[in-house]
Amino acid sequence: MNVQTSRALGPDPASELAQNVAVPFEEARAMPRSVYMDEGFVARELSEIFAREWICVGRATQFEKAGDYVTAEIAGRPVMVVRDNEGTLRAQSNVCLHRMSTLLKGSGNTRSIVCPYHAWTYNLDGRLRGAPGMGRNEGFQRGDYCLPQLRCETWLGWVLVSLNPDAPDPATHFAEVAALIEPYGMENYVQTFQEHHHWNTNWKVLAENFMESYHLPVCHAGTIGGFVKLEEMDCPPSGATFNYHSILKDPNAPLTNAHPSNTTLEGDMRRTTVLVTIYPALLITLTPGYFWYLSLHPDGPGKVRIIYGGGLSPDYVNDPKAQEHFAALKDLLDRVNDEDRGCTEAVYRGLCSSLAEPGHLSHLERPNYDFATYISGMLKQG
């Protein structure tokens, strides 16, 4: 269904969403179907949210050496993040300044950036180093060419990129969430894997699935569902830049509890898992023993690109059984992820029905309401 047709059948999705979040949480419903299905709404999300906010591309430990790089796409712009020869971590356009081919693919290490189309070659800092066959063009000056540079910051071990030159400094912007999770020392957790996935669901469906643990006993009955109790979940109102909820895990849950050698966390903190969403789309599960995350990017209404990674706390990394812990963690998280994929793709199939109607939210879905409020507020600013 095209945008014009979908809008002819009902009110503007942004207006519907604004009405949705205008009621108090105690009376709130899930977001209206139109905000998931309308192509024009996705376009606004890209231009008014993803092009303005901080987007995560991974962890700082992925860029230990000069030439280490990753590529991503933010709001339709191919970008790269690379450690240059001076040690600076740079985000820049991943599009050649000649005939506009994309340059690097995936992730890895490179000494220079070579266009795969005509071999224009750039230094790691984006300056053009060589351009074969250009000697007869009287207007060409190599020094005029440098790949457009983007905002790039490291915050608590995360590498964040923004297309917005005026985006607030992450240390200030996310100060409240940093204080919340400070006892865990998340900046010291060690990433042991990162993968890229492409699922058949709306990005907000996957984000909302992460934000509430109401579904854990059912969707994750085969993995982690038995280690949580709904009555022990805390879902408070959240800040302007993030939402969170916390779970007290069973003391016998593998890897979730603080390592015996840990002297920083005390009492219930030793078994408390915090699930944090850094707006718009960095989803972090932080436990005393490990972390895992999803960084999301919309691909139209019905698909989402996912950066999926995780790793262990320093205590478990330095444990004699570290390799055994790595294997156990990855197996667990892959099975959890497979369960989430099944649940979220089923939700999107349901959303495609004209009979779909949003129901009232549980008290365990407070983060979903705060997320909807954030999206609505960002679109109002636009």
Image (spheres, rainbow, N blue to C red):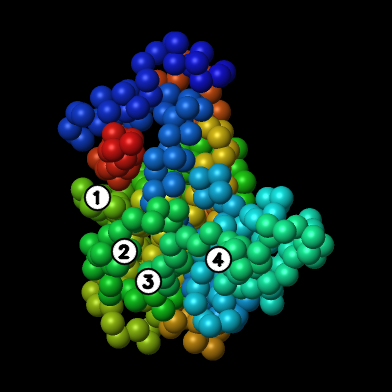
Q: Relative to residue 191, is residue 182 drawn left or right?
A: left
Q: Nearer the viewer, residue 234 or 67?
A: 67
Q: CA distance from mark 4 to mark 3?
A: 17 Å
- Identify the residue under disc 2: 169
Examine the rendering and report whether any part of residue 288 can be seen: no
Q: Amino acid at mark 2?
A: Asp
User: Looking at the picture, does residue 24 appear above or below residue 192?
Assistant: above
> What is the three-letter code of the residue carrying label 3?
Leu
Q: Residue at x 79, y 60 (%)?
A: 136
Q: Looking at the image, is 347 positioned above or below residue 245?
A: above
Judging by the rendered image, the residue that carries numbered circle 1 is 240
Which mark identifies residue 156? 3
Q: Which mark is residue 81?
A: 4
Gap between marks 2 and 1 measured at Cα:
15 Å
What amino acid is at disc 4? Val
Mark 4 is surrounded, within 10 Å at the Cα level, by few (under 14), some (14 to 19) or many (20 or more) other residues, namely many
Give the left or right position of residue 142, taking residue 251 as reference.
Answer: right
